[in-house]
Amino acid sequence: MKKSILILLLGSIISLTNCSQKQSKRSVDTIYLPPIELSMEQAVSLAQLPLKCIGQEYPNKLSQTLNDKEDLGTPENLHPAFYGCFDWHSSVHGHWMLVKLLKLYPEIGIREKIIEGLKTNITKENILLEIDYFNRIQEKSYERTYGWAWLLKLAEELYTWDHPLARELGANLQPLVDLIVDRYIDFLPRLNYPIRVGEHSNTAFGLSFAYDYANTTNNKELKTLISKRASEFYMSDENCPLTWEPSGFDFLSPCLEEADLMRRVLSKEEFKTWFKKFLPSFSNLDFVLKPAEVSDRSDGKLVHLDGLNFSRAWCLYGIASEHEEYYHLKKIASEHLEQSLLNVANDSYEGGHWLASFALYAFDSAK
């Protein structure tokens, strides 16, 4: 099964990359890249990974802070909605992926299995128990801000889907969404400095998905706050040290996640001016950015670099799609996407429990 995922997905990328390599590097006008899309067969193969892991309780990393022995519990007892896929945030974006696939492929052959999994986990009762956990005194910062961001991305996906299932799941999820929005609004004014690491706590990533949610749902308070804080954190940044990347455990690019956020909050002209100062080398049509290489895909931290390739890809696709003078970055994005598709098909749970979501988001950003 997993080998078939690799074969199917590589077909889309290889044709795109080979074609792009034949194009002139001297003029954006001469570069043509064919569209990249998932077929129905590819979608079914990808869906198998989160469909399996959202109900797989072990192995599990709870990342729990204990106040006393009464706080102990099994993953499913503590997090009845999002207990699978090794950790809470991976379960959340696994659920996002299944919703996304239902929207993209409403006639997908395993539709009923996906719906059953979503309806089993995202119930009103389960979400209220999730809220109970978030309201524990020692868990006020739980999943801040990476898991928060993916929860809002899931909520946004449901909000933009005109379907009875989406309305049911969205209504069940909304109390937790409201709590997360409140946590953002409380936390961001108290964050004096952005967190610029390449892992979960990266501020720019956490703000990007939250901004998407606020923009889509017209939450003016959250949108305004994110725009304000992003400008305060990043507007004066210049010459981001891309040569410092990647760090050994990165799955997010500090430089590119920052750019991905700023393209959202700035106007096109403002972003163009800012980006030329921030990453000036990217305007060069001969610019090269080498994908990260993973030495051991059975190591849960080293395999992060596969995620880095996917997240770099979606950042580059986003910039290139909105700014035609950076169209050449799509080729680099596709090279990154191709590099890490191997791990989507790998038997190791260390990557399999989360990388399919990253791959799908990168594919969707290639439009």
Image (spheres, rainbow, N blue to C red):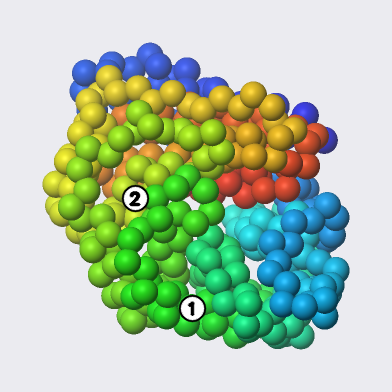
Residue drawn at the location 74% of the way across and 33% of the way down = 298
Q: Residue furthest front?
A: 68
Residue drawn at the location 46% of the way across and 33% of the way down = 246
Q: Which residue is mark 1?
A: 183
Residue 294 percent location from the top left of the image: 61, 27
**Amino acid type, mark 1:** Arg
Residue 351 percent location from the top left of the image: 70, 40
Going by the image, does 190 lie left or right of 167?
left
Going by the image, does 212 lie left or right of 235?
right
- Which residue is more in the foreground, 209 or 253? 253
Residue drawn at the location 17% of the way across and 41% of the way down = 277
Q: Which residue is mark 2?
A: 258
Secondary-structure class at tag 1: helix
Q: Which of the two discs, 1 and 2, labels the residue nearer the N terminus?
A: 1
Residue 22 percent location from the top left of the image: 38, 14
- Which residue is more in the foreground, 343 or 196? 196
**Amino acid type, mark 2:** Glu
Give the distance between the C-alpha atoms of the residues marked 1 and 2, in whole angstroms.
Answer: 21 Å
Can you tell which quarter of the image residue 202 is in?
Answer: bottom left
Q: Quadrant of the N terminus?
A: top right
Can you tell which quarter of the image residue 6 is in?
Answer: top right
Relative vertical location of residue 197 with respect to residue 62 in this rendering, above or below:
above
Residue 37 percent location from the top left of the image: 54, 40
